[in-house]
Image (cartoon, grey):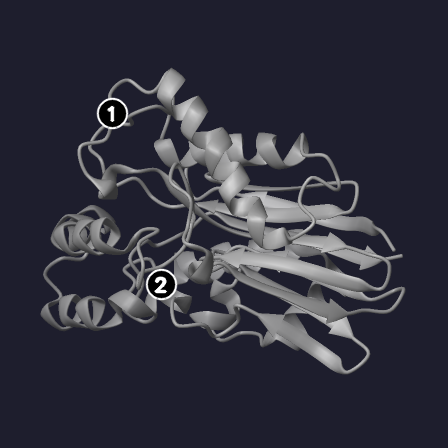
Amino acid sequence: MHIKVLDIASRGSGSHNEDRAGSTGNLAWVIDGATDLVEEPLVGEHSDAAWLAEHTQRSLSSMEQEQHDDLAELPAGVSMYLADAFARHSRRRPTARWEHPSAAAIIIRATKDHLDWVSLGDCALIVETPAGLNCIGVGGPEAGDSRLASALQRLNIKRTLITEAERRSELLPQLRKGRGEKLNQPGGYGVISITPPPRELVSTGRLSVASSSHVLLATDGLMRLVEIFRRYDAQTLLETAKTKGLGRLLHELRSLEADDSDCFGHPRLKQSDDATGLLMRIC
């Protein structure tokens, strides 16, 4: 079996998109760079998140198809590539782990009669299988800024910190503490970064798929339609992507975000987030 890309769409929330998506041979992926917590980028022209997402894309695009028999080994291999590139191009070394650039990602590989996947962070995979729809990363513990939900609710009750910059400034110590203690640390969370994630933090699986099955990969920005705005569930999101296209979904997302620009109706750290989808069919 192989992967046929039917549609791909990615839209940044600002002037620079920190998401990436792509495919090569029997591999496909989406990447979501984590917003920088440093005041100035250590390595990127625009942001460390964009730099890391772009270099992760380059690593995956150049990867030999059978380089990793076990897909769970792939994040460690990518981290080696990123660490080397970071060491050569960074303006200074990080002084704390929260300064490390990182990204969520989900990567799939089509085999003879299965779909293998590896996931780090909060991207989503929606797959048609003979047993029904299978959803990875949908409604997960990190979905919809849930880890910040209580803090965001407190800010909304105050209604004093209403701009995105003010929300970020208020929550920055909490964000830095959490990233510094948990990024690729035992008992924390696994991501693509310049240090490899512990194996136990790398989620993997194998799904049986039939020819003509559809697959949707999405970053959490696109999944706001499910996790925050509740306009779709996994099934209807996939069906809409198939019938109306990913561009239509991104347009709807931006309209919903603009209508709740103060983030009071649907609490979230940023009004808009980079959003990316990759729709495929298994052939």
Q: Nearer the viewer, mark 1 or mark 2?
A: 1
Give the x, y percent position of residue 12: 48, 42
Tag 2 residue: 260
Q: Choose between 145 and 266: the one closer to the eye.
A: 145
Location of mark 1 (residue)? 93
Tag 1: amino acid:
Arg
> Is residue 17 shown to the viewer in this render?
no
Pick the residue in front: 235 or 120.
120
- Which quadrant does the N terminus fall into? bottom right
Which residue is located at x 58 percent, y 45 percent?
74
Q: Is residue 142 left or right of residue 66?
A: left
Q: Secondary structure at mark 2?
A: loop
Q: Is residue 239 above or below residue 85?
A: below
Quarter of the figure with residue 149: bottom left
x%, y% of residue 250? Answer: 57, 54
Q: Amino acid at mark 2?
A: Asp
